[in-house]
Amino acid sequence: MTEINFTFDGDGITATDGQSLAAALTGAGRREFRVTAQGSPRGIFCGMGVCQDCLVSVDGTPNRRACMTKAADGMTVETQHAFPELGTDSRLPETPRVRVLTPDVLVIGGGAGGLSATIAARRAGADVVTLDERTVEGGQYYKQSADGSLLDAQQAEGAGLVEDARASGAEIIRGVEIWGAFDGPLVLAERDGAALIIRPRTVIVATGAYERPIIVPGWTLPGVMTTGAAQTLWRSYRTLPGRRIVVCGSGPLNMQVALELADGGAEIALVAETAPSPFLHPLRGARLSIHGPALAWQGLAMLRSLRRRRVPVRNGLRLSAVEEVESGLSVTFRRKSGGTHTVQADSLCMNAGFEPQNEILRLLGARMTYDPAAGHLRCERSETLETSVPGIFAVGDCAGLGGAPAACAEGRIAGRSAAAQSGHGDAYDLFADQRALRRHRRFQKALWQLHDVSPTPVGGLPHDTILCRCEEITVGDALAGYAVTPGHLGTLKRATRVGMGRCQGRYCGPAAARLIVEHTGEALTDRSFFAPRVPVKPVAINAILAAEEALCSDD
Amino acid sequence: MTTDLLVIGGGIVGRITAFELAKAGARVILVDAAQNAGSTANAGSLHVQMQSRFIRIYPEHAPNVERALPYYKQAAECWGTLEACLGDMHLVRKGGLMLAESAGQMAFLEEKARREETKGLDVALLDRAELDRVAPWIGPQIVGAELCRDEGKLNPLLANMQLAKACADLGVTCVTDRVEGLVVTADRVSAAGQKGHYRASEVVVAASWGSGALVRTLGIDIPTAPEPLHMNITEACDQRIDHLVQHAERSITLKQFKTGQIVIGGGWPADDHGTDQVPGVRAGSIVGNVALAARLAPPIGALRIIRTWAGMNTTADGASIIGRLPGVQRVVMAVPGDAGYTLAPLVAQMAASIVTGRDPPADPSPYSPARFAA
Ligand SMILES: Cc1cc2nc3c(=O)[nH]c(=O)nc-3n(C[C@H](O)[C@H](O)[C@H](O)COP(=O)(O)OP(=O)(O)OC[C@H]3O[C@@H](n4cnc5c(N)ncnc54)[C@H](O)[C@@H]3O)c2cc1C
Ligand SMILES: Cc1cc2nc3c(=O)[nH]c(=O)nc-3n(C[C@H](O)[C@H](O)[C@H](O)COP(=O)(O)OP(=O)(O)OC[C@H]3O[C@@H](n4cnc5c(N)ncnc54)[C@H](O)[C@@H]3O)c2cc1C
Ligand code: FES
């Protein structure tokens, strides 16, 4: 392992080569990365490039996401202030490199679903390009470690998938920020300032999900992060988010990550699950073991392992507030049975379900329906996983939560179908994968019945709770804005700036959409949520300039 | 619902009209479809000098615009009064720069400035050295600019909210509904909405692109074609760009809000998905509009665009439409036409004064709908 050195606000930081800036800073005990317009410190929250709260300035370039930027020897990293100085250099950047790609199949996302689709489409003979935003391979479930070491069977299985995809002959490009998707289809992206212009025949969207937070007073404090963010710190960068950790929310990921962090040497002060104990629902537990005996068994084994490590696992605790105290964070839960429970820790991990990263699908016009059980939109798809837009396929969690085994099966189906649509193979005999997929879906349905990812009504939160992290809008601000100009989510946004920040409403949007229906009583639909708009993620003006030069010479 | 006065359209014109009427003592209902308002999508430029985009795209409307120059100047001044009376709108009036990249463009600006000066505008021509002093961020290819000191900028979202609050304070009843037709009888006017019926002694139509369809139900043809336009916004940086920035030949407006964000627009097209769907963003518009901004102001290149959107404008026939419909009682029009946010306070105050019979702030006769008489 090579050591590297960089500075953060003038202090020397030592890291291992391959670590993200976020991991390197966390390892060095630094967790405040930026300061908001109202003067609050922020740090890592999502760990996957979505929340935009980990911004730092790198070698003079403002607003770089520490979680997506690799630490490099000699870097000058600084705390990001809310109003960075606009440089005075009035020269235009040198003409950047440009690539125009015209594959048969474009796969967006290199996780379980995307890699499986890549392999299937390539094996059918299609010319495949696969793009992924991260530099570390494998997506979320199969995320690899930056130094190539293998932590467990899950990572080893992922390594196999990554290797098969690489060997398939598909062109896999990492570190690519896709920011535009238009009819055609035309996909615009950047990589290190260079423009990628992609005009594929078919597209398989496999962008996965991000985590649903628990919006409570104090959820923006440095040290509070999603469970997945903590998992990435550990699985990919062998960095622990803290020494004494509380994990809370609902779903199997929390228990798994608690176990991983405990094995990594952290003290897990508490694993708090919102749902009541599964032993209170023996029928639901039985259903789970019928639909996926192996996975159900894994769940029980996980619980036993936690017990063996003396990690307290409590059901029926709902997070209600986080406060900063001298020793770190004071975390308060409400008991289902009444009363509160408070724990001290230096970091808090939260996961209350998932939100699909469906921006590209919605931009391309794919039809969505609201799934009340999962609390998010699902993409309408055919048996071959084609969306309502011909030539656009969707696989994995971006189409609605389904889990990694389902994502793999969907990837294989869509990969062959997209290849066939662009003239390679016949996508005949998909039965085995379709059967497997039905089994995985039944398991997922049973699994989530044991958990409680129902969001707390926003209207019931204390009024000074921050609803929109980016713009620092409180629940009280939102309610006051709604009172002056009632209407829909768009009206609320324009009245209060909810959802206008850098994360583009990914965290406050679903909550604010619920706040509206709490008032109107209308049902949630695709149009209840923020309209999808380019850029899919914030994109540097110079990257757009590069794309313009490419498009002008391409036309 | 029955009331004294009805206002249809709750954009900035409708809200200021309702505010003025309520202030004069009337009971007012404001009915708004809450869809595709230009007022919630616009860039907040207070335009006074002639916009090159307009002259180029609608040359046949240029004489109307030139005649109306003093009226734009007066409207920009109205915003100062409104802000003083209603609260912060982030209004800044440090002038607008129109940049030239060639001697030919500079010559065009010289001729334009000469004509604008005769209309009473406060304009000056700046060479590169003078420009460097007031705008050190401009690209190397810029040779000079016209400065119009009457221009400015504000944050329309704040202004919209201040007006919404002022209307609420004066007891204006706001209803979300889309009006489908108007019927005028001897003693009143009735509006049929999708959710309800509204009756009043008079109605002000301030429905922008929706106005033409409304008065067509009364047999009058007024062109208010919807024009979907594109916008971009960056994340915040320190306050550096004071002016409203435009280009002598190309479509662009660029300015920095007090939030520190840079807003880039200037009339690039968006896809029309019908008036009850939001317009779609085109690849050519985000790419073309932002790349042009990067060339005019290279230091902004490191900032990120965080959002684009599109909204509906209407330029009507190039001039405002203010006043009573020809041959129809009880219907007053209030449609601003091009640069309608700038013009809104003046348009609204003129329309309100026609209803209340008070002295108008400016002579509305050049903008009379009489020009559309069958
Ligand atoms: C933080 C996190 C941690 C998780 N950990 C676990 C776990 O340990 N165990 C478990 O069972 N489930 C986990 N899940 C659930 C898991 O995502 C799914 O079950 C499974 O990985 C779905 O596969 P997928 O291919 O749909 O998505 P993913 O594997 O998430 O892959 C999506 C890929 O697309 C890329 N991408 C997204 N948007 C873009 C874009 N605009 N441009 C380019 N690339 C893009 C992402 O970087 C990612 O590599 C986790 C989810 C999250 C969000
Ligand atoms: C993207 C964009 C940028 C712009 N930038 C600028 C700028 O920088 N400076 C400037 O001066 N101007 C600008 N404009 C123009 C300006 O925004 C508009 O001219 C102005 O806001 C019009 O105000 P309004 O109140 O007349 O209409 P709008 O704000 O359009 O409001 C009309 C309202 O009427 C409603 N409506 C329509 N039909 C009906 C019906 N039948 N029943 C009930 N309600 C109905 C609509 O839903 C809407 O809410 C821009 C416009 C756009 C689209
Ligand atoms: S932690 Fe880096 S973007 Fe969320």
Image (tube, rainbow, N blue to C red):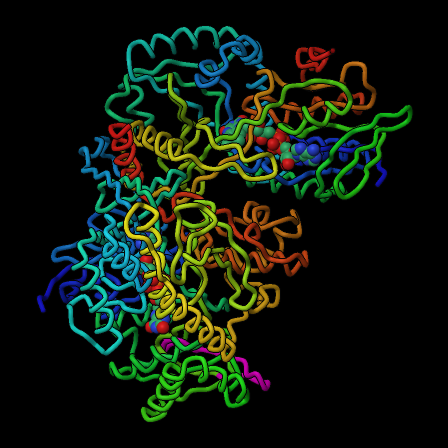
Q: Point out the stretch of residues depicted in magenta.
A: A326-341
Residue B174 locus on image (x, y percent): 73, 42
Q: Which is more toward the observer, A400 or A434?
A: A434
- Against B301, residue A386 (above or below) is below
Q: How many labels were placed on the picture?
A: 0
Query: Quadrant of residue B234 in the image?
Result: top left
Q: Let me know if residue A537 is in the magenta part.
A: no
Residue B253 visible somewhere in the drawing: yes
Q: Quadrant of ligand 2?
A: top right
Residue at 57% from the left image edge and 83% from the top image edge: A336
Residue at 63% from the left image edge and 52% from the top image edge: A482
Q: Please identify the dominant SS of the magenta region.
A: strand
Q: Which is more toward the observer, B233 or B197?
A: B197
- Against B340, residue A495 (above or below) is below
- Against A62, residue A110 (above or below) is below
Horizontal side of A293 relative to A110 (left or right) equals right
